[in-house]
Amino acid sequence: MKLYNYYRSGTSFRVRIALNLKGLSYEYIAVHLARGEQHGPAYRAVSPDSLVPVLDVAGNPDHALLSQSMAIIEYLDETHPEPPLLPRDPLGRARVRALAQTIACEIHPINNLRVLKYLADPLGLDDGRRAEWYNHWVREGLRHYERRLQLLAEERARAGLPPSVYSYGDTPTLADCCLVPQLVNGQRFGLRYDDLDIPLTLAIFERCMALDAFQRAHPSRCPDAE
Ligand SMILES: N[C@@H](CCC(=O)N[C@@H](CS)C(=O)NCC(=O)O)C(=O)O
């Protein structure tokens, strides 16, 4: 498999984590987003929407190019079921997808590179105002994530179960693949989490980052890291 990605891309980071958790090796193909390589004709042939990540599952540029990190991770989970990244039961799957989408649908799309660029030009927001935008949506989204974790912990307590080790249950799931890159991305933008009151979220982050699969996927460990 080949993964077209970029070290600082949070959605690429999600897929790198999933590949590592599954124990799958892949060829790392860097697309330098900051230099605009995603808009060149070579990459356009791979990704019509000029976005990373793209996973080439056949090693053939003419077919089996998968886009959208969530679809890619679910594909990997279905084709390589162990260890599962989604619970077996429908209720658990819905819960994990809801957590994952709290990050992937409510935070990330309004904060990605092209949106931040558009806020600058043509909308004219300076760096400070753009940071305000970014911080607002990340902080709000993380508070909502924490609240979901609290509700799940209460539900488990009612069933006589201890709190989850990771976002949902005792093993990492799709939700953790989304959470960790978002938190790392926020750190890069100078976001502080200590005044946010999100203890469950931060404890899960630490547990994930203690795992080799998450460490190896970190931007600082990527071949294109600067
Ligand atoms: N929903 C897509 C989002 C992909 C996305 O936004 N990728 C960003 C990097 S994290 C990108 O390629 N940005 C290029 C740009 O903004 O020009 C996914 O989950 O894969």
Image: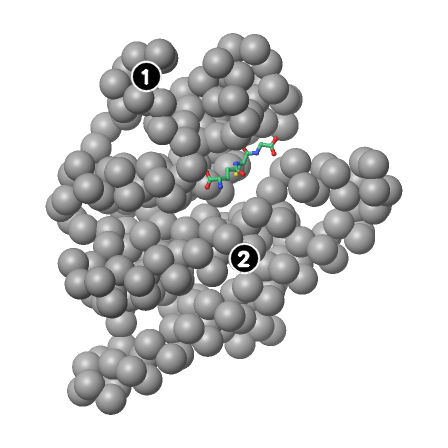
Mark 2 residue's CB less than 8 Å from ligand 1: no
In the drawing, does residue 186 fall left or right of residue 174? Answer: right
Residue at 32%, 52% in the rendered image:
174
Residue 16 in view, yes or no: yes
Relative to 38, residue 198 above or below = below
Q: On the image, numbered disc 2 is attached to which residue?
A: 106
CA distance separating discs 1 and 2: 31 Å
The residue shown at (83%, 42%) is: 123
Residue at 31% across / 62% down in the picture? 94
- Find numbered disc 2 in the image and state the secondary structure of the residue it sits on: loop
Q: Earlier in the sequence, mark 1 or mark 2?
A: 1
The residue at which mark 1 appears reads as 63
Q: Secondary structure at mark 1?
A: loop
- Give amino acid for label 1: His
- Percent across and percent down for residue 119 are 77, 43
- Indicate the quadrant containing the N terminus: top left, top right, bottom left or bottom right: top left
Circle 1 Cα neighbour tier, 10 Å, few/some/many (<14 / 14–19 / ≥20): few
Q: Quadrant of residue 201?
A: bottom left
Q: Is residue 157 above or below residue 30?
A: below
Residue 95 in the image: x percent, y percent?
Answer: 32, 65
Query: In the image, residue 124 lies at what x, y percent?
Result: 86, 42
Q: In the displayed image of the protein, which residue is found farthest to the right?
A: 124
Instruction: Tell me the tag on residue 120.
Output: none
Residue beneath the point at 60% across and 64% down:
139
> In the displayed image of the protein, which residue is found farthest to the left?
82
Circle 2: residue type: Glu
Marks 1 and 2 close (CB-CB < 8 Å): no
Instruction: Indicate the quadrant where residue 73 lies.
Output: top left
Residue 223 shows in the view: no
